[in-house]
Image (cartoon, rainbow, N blue to C red):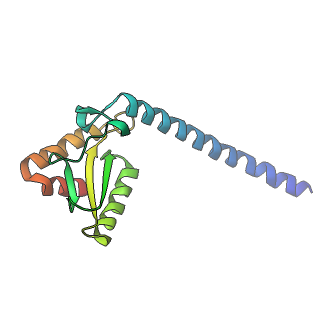
């Protein structure tokens, strides 16, 4: 009985630290994301970012895959974000597995508070696009 109580006490501290870490992480991400979503400019400052105001896909967008595909995924992304990088690999696989059926549109959404270099990365990718076109943009983003 005493051994069981000691084991429970030994687990309380790590579990408490884990729960606190998750709560802090969620609050930071929610707070930064909410503020960025509500007040930041999307596409490097061209338009307020919100689902209701999302502009139609145009020739100005960076598109990978068939532009006339029945499924179009518009990604608002941060080039410094580890989760976005993971999603990038997933989308490459989706395009490969569903060739001709999916178009991937990339739009910048740098989260400056979380990734201070993200805006400069976005600008650099646009420079690559300006110099080498859509293929150069995607080559830069892939790296």
Residue farthest toward the left in the current orientation of the protein: 131
Residue 114 shown left or right of residue 1 in the figure: left
> From what the image shows, is residue 37 above or below residue 59?
above
Q: Position of residue 56 (x, y in %)?
A: 25, 44
Q: Is residue 143 visible?
A: no
Q: Identify which residue, 44 or 99, lies in the foreground.
A: 99
How many discs mark residues in the rendered view?
0
Q: Residue at coordinates 25% horizontally, 38% vertically from top-left?
A: 43
Residue 30 shown left or right of residue 104 in the figure: right
Q: Identify which residue, 16 or 29, lies in the foreground.
A: 29
Q: Position of residue 86 (x, y in %)?
A: 38, 57
Residue 64 shown left or right of residue 80 in the figure: left
Q: Residue at coordinates 15% horizontally, 45% vertically from top-left?
A: 60
Q: Can you say which quadrant of the picture contains the N terminus?
A: bottom right
Instruction: Locate residue 139: give its quadrant.
Output: bottom left
> From what the image shows, is residue 67 above or below residue 76?
below
Instruction: Locate residue 40: give its quadrant.
Output: top left
Q: Can you say which quadrant of the picture contains the C terminus?
A: bottom left
Q: Residue at coordinates 22% horizontally, 59% vertically from top-left?
A: 64
Residue farthest toward the top in the current orientation of the protein: 39
Instruction: Locate residue 120: give its quadrant.
Output: top left
Q: Identify which residue, 128 or 68, lies in the foreground.
A: 68
Q: Position of residue 59 (x, y in %)?
A: 14, 48
Q: Residue at coordinates 26% horizontally, 50% vertically from top-left?
A: 106
Residue farthest toward the right in the current orientation of the protein: 1
Q: Is residue 114 visible?
A: yes
């Amino acid at each position: 009985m005493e051994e069981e109580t000691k084991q429970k006490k030994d687990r309380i501290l790590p579990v408490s630290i884990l729960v606190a870490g998750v709560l802090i992480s969620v609050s930071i991400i929610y707070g930064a994301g909410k503020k960025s979503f509500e007040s930041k400019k999307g596409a490097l400052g061209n338009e307020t970012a919100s689902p209701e105001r999302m502009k139609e896909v145009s020739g100005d967008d960076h598109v990978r895959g068939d532009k006339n595909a029945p499924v179009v995924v518009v990604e608002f992304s941060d080039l410094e974000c580890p989760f976005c990088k993971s999603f990038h690999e997933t989308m490459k696989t989706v395009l490969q597995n569903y060739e001709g059926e999916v178009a991937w549109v990339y739009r910048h959404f740098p989260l400056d508070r979380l990734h201070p270099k993200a805006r400069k990365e976005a600008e650099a990718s646009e420079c690559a696009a300006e110099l080498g076109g859509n293929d150069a943009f995607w080559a830069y983003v892939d790296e």
